[in-house]
Amino acid sequence: MAIQRKKADVVIVGLGWAGSLMAEELTRAGLEVVAIDRGPWLDTATDTPPAVDPDELRWSIRRELLLQPGEYTLTFRNNSGQTAVPTRELKAFQMGKSVGGAGFHWAGMAWRFSEWDFRVRSATLERYGAAKLKGLDQVQDWGITYADLEPFYDRFERIAGISGVAGNINGEIRPGGNPFEGPRSREFPTPPLKDSRLMQMYRDSTAQMGMHPFYIPVAHVGSAYVNPLGVSMAPCTYCGYCMFHGCGNYSKSSPQACVIPALMRRKNFTLITQGYVTKIHKAEDGKTATGVSYFDEQGREVVQPADIVALCSFTYDNARLMMLSDIGKQYDPVTQTGTIGRAYNYQTCAGAHVWFEDETLNPFIGAGGLGIQVDDYNGDNFDHSNLDFIGGAGLLTVSREGMPIGRSGLLPPGSPRWGKGFKQTYKDNYQNYGIIFGQGTSMPDRDAYLSLDPNYKDRWGTPLLRMTFDWNQNDRNMARFIEQRAVDIGKKMGAKHVHTFNSAAKSWSPYDENSNHTQGGMVMGEDPRTSAVNTYLQSWDAHNVFVVGASAFPTNAGYNPTSTVGALAIRTARAIHEKYQHNPGSLV
Amino acid sequence: MKRRDALRSMGALFAAAGLAKVGAVELKSVPPQTGLNREMLPSPVMSGGQGNVFKGQARATLTAVFDRLIPHDELGASASEAGCVDYLDAQMNGPYGESKDLYLDRPLRADESALMGLTISLRTRRDYTLAGLLFIDNHAQKLHGRAFAELDGEQMDAILRQLDEGRLDWEGAGSGSRLFEFLLLSVREGYFADPLYGGNRGMVGWKLVGFPGARYDYRQYIDRRGQDLGLEPISLIPVS
């Protein structure tokens, strides 16, 4: 017999960025909120202080802050004709394993998507005509615009203390910022950090090529800062132990550093740790949900009733829990009907490793997102009339490649990897390596989707999520183009060796670690036939279920997803407490 | 697996990964214990090594392989002199060697390796490494009638080169080069990880490339672009 808990106004599944930002809005509005996270409590000062954090082996290589496949994994195949097999080792699927989710170990790049990214279909039709969308029939608009989301991006950036230089304030283009970005209402809350030598070289070379380099907006605060929730942060110290690490300085923005300290002090907020949610309960009429079930640490089934269910559990479990709970119709790639699992999309990456001669780059000085980007070949910032694709990539360099185990594998092609000569080669190249990384758009495709696996199960006997994905022709073409732009930049920078990479050059596998940015599967939109949730991330099939996260992105931009996740979460929470709670029903 | 067993093993997983601190609890405020978490502190490996996993012939083979991958030369210590064998022994004696982090459920389909693009083994890392070293040793016996560790350097390199270049398979296509990559990754980890894990003795790996180690604040150095900062490395433990 399951244990019954007291009913809450809202139950939130997963306390990462999306869940904590939702909880902050909802509790401030007076709602009684219970959040359930599958991981244990983890905090910055007590768990990753400077005595623990600067450890490459444990955090960067073993990745002990991440959810391991032994606990949770997905099966994978490239197309519907194959039988999927499980992902056994941790590579591309990088979920958090504790409270705070992936927001604790992330690298920190904090982008707004461009105006184009929200309306890829309409904008492409307007500029190039219908022929340009041939083979891209699942590409669709988000149903909201950049302008709709701007206030919520702003709120996320204030809470997280994002460091940056505005390129466009209310339509006025500003020096030093990204001239291609959508209009911001004001400057970033904290100033930029300083450039490394590599960043200066990248700025100089791309500017000489006529491009527009700018400082990447990043979640490493640029000065001492107190956020709107009253939480204090300290300036980043460039320690370099950042991506896959915690932060012992209160400098990297995370749910723990920015939101949870305020949240935990509110009487109407309760957090349940190590609770593994397995199901959303449907009401008898089948049109709403009554709460969720989870297994607690002792293996007991517990029911948490609630008036509103908010899934904030990362792209994968957002879709999986909807499937396991039989809410909505699962996507069928043959008939192209159903929306649950539809339009999974990824991040198409290409670029170049470069090696200089006689540089002293001091690569150990850095941070997860400390870098320079050009957006001249991102989104639709360049003319695609004579190109065989839509979309593009942000081309960036980043100062975070100083840790010596990882770097020992980044030697110029043809140099000795072991034995005689290895030490000398590594010594000669340690100060001379840089990366030019093209982080590209990803368009949905009819055979790229999420479903339940028929063969493999988790520890509870529940089916694993199955991912079906491979690169589509549009994205392959885009990646080839971006790869060449990276070569141009590398040569201009004076690199002695330029060695390209192109993730889309062969079929993808989750053991290829190009990016952990995975989106879609529960996409938002204006049409219930082609979207799983409406523009408030409200399920079309159960109006008191909200599915919040990158699972809602119908297309992916050439940027990291987190700020957009944060902005969507805040927008949804505000709609719930301003409108939905007073008049439950469809918000559109 | 029964649910209770599954949950018990999940608890063990958290413990293995050092995240066990607070059990499944209902939290209404920030947990009161604010001291540094014991489970988050790493466990140092004493030099000399325990020899728990690699004993006798396996240890001799591993030492020989590692010292061909990173030999002693004018730039410094060999892998075994730097403690890399002790390092891997300690790693294989813990949760990493037991592969607690991997999903090892069957079936292992015949086409899994082809679909995933790399050779999959369902062994734990400890069993995998021991079996791989035995394979290398047996191959040396077959070719030269002697244990791998008793070959001369050229003979050892020839076998390692065959593995590296995918010309010597062990248990299916691609398995030889995957074994080689695993051994190469392991020796690099030992040579360049913090000395507290048993390798990188005297911080030889860090001194080789000029990595300053466990420092945590470079604000006073960021403006000295392009300069050799001459920073002495520091480790998370004072002696190694």
Image (cartoon, coloured by chain):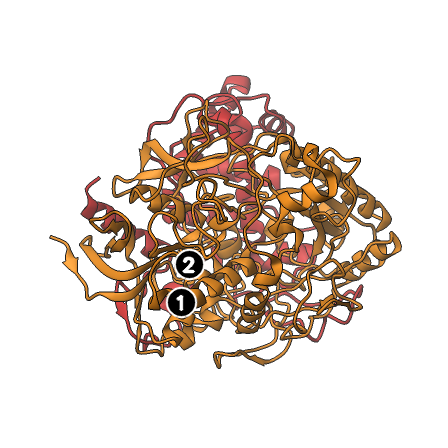
Chain colours: A orange, B red
Asked whether A141 or B96 is in front, the reply is A141
Return the residue at label 2. A587
Vertical relation: A335 (above or below) A25? above
Vertical relation: A387 (above or below) B52? above
Q: Which mark is residue A579?
A: 1
Outermost residue on the right side: it is A208
SS of the residue at dot 1?
loop
Asked whether B158 or A427 is in front, the reply is A427
| In this rendering, position of residue B94 left or right of residue B161 | left
SS of the residue at dot 2?
loop
Asked whether A108 or B94 is in front, the reply is A108
Dot 2 and dot 1 residues touching (CB under 8 Å): yes
Mark 2 vs 1, N-terminal side? 1
x, y percentage for residue B48?
A: 46, 53
Residue A576, image quadrant: bottom left
Q: What residue type is disc 2 on?
A: Leu
Same-chain check, marks 2 and 1: yes
Q: Is residue A81 visible?
A: yes
Instruction: Measure the alpha-carbon separation of dots 2 and 1.
Output: 8 Å
Residue A15, image quadrant: bottom left
Write down the chain letter for disc 1.
A
| In this rendering, position of residue B41 left or right of residue A355 | left
Check disc 1: other Cα within 10 Å, few if <14, some if 14-19, many if 20+: few
Vertical relation: A248 (above or below) A505? below
| In this rendering, position of residue A164 left or right of residue A82 | right
Outermost residue on the left side: it is A1
Q: Residue at 37% x, 77% y: name it.
A: B34
Q: Residue at 73% x, 33% y: name it.
A: A388
Viewport quadrant of the C terminus of chain A: bottom left
x, y percentage for residue B94?
A: 37, 49
x, y percentage for residue A121?
A: 62, 43
Asked whether A468 or B171 is in front, the reply is A468
